[in-house]
Amino acid sequence: MIVETIVTTEDKEGIVHIAPFGMRTDSGALVIAPFRPSVTLDNLEATGRAVVNFTDDVRVFAGCVTGRRDWPLRPATKIKGHVLENALSHLETEVAEREDDPERPRFHLRVVHEETHAPFRGFNRAQAAVIEAAILVSRLDRLPAEKIDREIEYLSIAIGKTAGPRELEAWGWLMDHIAAARNSGAAAAR
């Protein structure tokens, strides 16, 4: 199973990187497989630590893939790292095992500490739609435009029916990013 999370890592100098990640759970173990090149990959190799954050604020997912990575943080409890201030819960982890791969190395993470900060009240359909659209945006360079358009058209139904202010803001960032990417691509093609 894959769970959508926000992962915070640090480089050797302590500079924090925030990124959305589909975290695979494999027999209770957490596995993260960042594509090469990746700041998260570099940080995991450099420090061997990550904080896995669970949040229902989909603006963080949309924000990270559209260049908005400045989210409030606080220090982790047991490891040198940072937790999203608005995380409902988080896991502090260390790399237990690394599987090399030319495209996506896999890091098996060992949980050294976990905390719950607030109750999870459930997702609405618009939140799920924003997360799916954020995944599409993260793959603009690998997916055909027609596929993206079809999926965005379908996802927009949930936005229209169930979105609140946070989801509408996140959706707007994603749609603006797609339009800007296409406009810059059209300009480059001239």
Image (spheres, grey):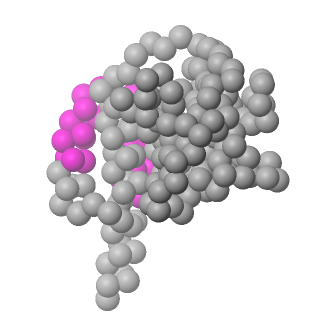
Query: Where, quadrant-wise, is the N terminus in this rendering?
Result: top left
Give the residue drawn at x 55%, y 43%: 107
Give the residue drawn at x 23%, y 63%: 144
Percent of width and height locating residue 47: 73, 46
Q: Main secondary structure of the magenta part?
A: helix
Above/below status of 106 relative to 87: below
Percent of width and height locating residue 154: 18, 41
Q: Quadrant of residue 72?
A: top right
- Region in magenta: 151-177
Left or right: residue 178 versus residue 64 is left
Left or right: residue 99 versus residue 79 is left
Q: Quadrant of residue 158?
A: top left
Out of 82 and 183, give the one closest to the viewer: 82
Left or right: residue 172 versus residue 84 is left
Does residue 36 show up? yes
Give the residue drawn at x 27%, y 60%: 143
Magenta highlight on residue 162: yes
Q: Quadrant of residue 93?
A: top right
Disc count in the image?
0
Magenta highlight on residue 107: no
Q: Which residue is at the far right? A: 13
Does residue 86 show up? no
Above/below status of 56 relative to 33: above
Percent of width and height locating residue 92: 67, 28
Give the residue drawn at x 72%, y 52%: 46
Query: Where, quadrant-wise, is the C terminus in this rendering?
Result: bottom left
Percent of width and height locating residue 30: 51, 31
